Amino acid sequence: MTGFDLGEPAADADEESEPETESEPETADEQEHTNSSPGADTASIERNRTDDSPQDRRSGEQKDSIDESTADPDPGEVGPAFPYSDVRQGAMYPREETWDQLEDEIGMALTPKFREEAVRDEELREIHDAMLELVIDNIDEVADRVMEKRIKSYRNEEF
């Protein structure tokens, strides 16, 4: 004995504790890492996932009660435009320098713009979705760019 009086044991000290379960990821990034981990039990992840974005938390009646004449909310306060569960992952195959340039532009041009608008929780899925929408809106330019690059490559020109 150490001579310290530890007091009376807690009332539930003799009860068996329940097995601990994995906690729900708190952010979309944690969800992405959880979902991409090797051997993850995707069925249990799907059962436990709750899409808790501000958009999802608003019920239909709350949406209806918002007066259409009021100003739009601050983008920094509303959270991501769509939940991770709406994502369809697909591969893109750009050249390394093109991908590096994209990452640089996101970091040096987009991130500061988000900060100016008090958006601190931008998600890469939102950026990719907006980029693809812009491509779709300008699809003819994509075809023109591909043909232009082929010609430059044939002529051994930089592109």
Image (tube, rainbow, N blue to C red):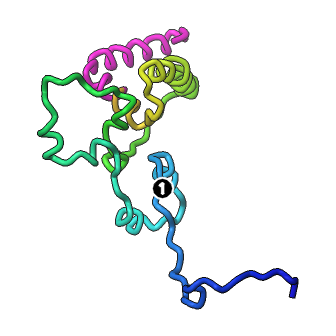
Which quadrant of the view contains residue 139?
A: top left
- The stretch in magenta equals 131-159
Which residue is more in the foreground, 88 or 25? 25
Residue shown at 37% from the left, 26% from the top: 131
- Drawn side of residue 2 relative to residue 94, left or right: right
Instruction: Find residue 133 and report its horizontal and vertical position in percent.
Output: 29, 27
SS class, disc 1: loop
Residue on which disc 1 sits: 25
Residue shown at 39% from the left, 45% from the top: 89
Residue shown at 55% from the left, 89% from the top: 15
Which residue is more in the foreground, 99 or 155? 99
Number of dots carrying numbers = 1
124 above or below 108? Answer: below
Q: Is residue 118 magenta?
A: no
- The outermost residue toward the bottom is 14
Instruction: Find residue 105 and report its horizontal and vertical position in percent.
Output: 52, 20
Specify the principal SS of the magenta part: helix
122 above or below 114? Answer: below
Instruction: Find residue 107 and report its horizontal and vertical position in percent.
Output: 54, 24
Q: Is residue 135 magenta?
A: yes
For the N terminus, which image quadrant?
A: bottom right
Instruction: Find residue 71 and report its horizontal and vertical position in percent.
Output: 22, 22
Residue shown at 39% from the left, 29% from the top: 76
Q: Amino acid at mark 1?
A: Pro
Q: Residues within 10 Å of mark 1 (few under 14, many from 20)?
A: some
- The outermost residue toward the right is 2
149 above or below 96? Answer: above
Which residue is more in the foreground, 97 or 54? 54
- Drawn side of residue 97 relative to residue 73, left or right: right
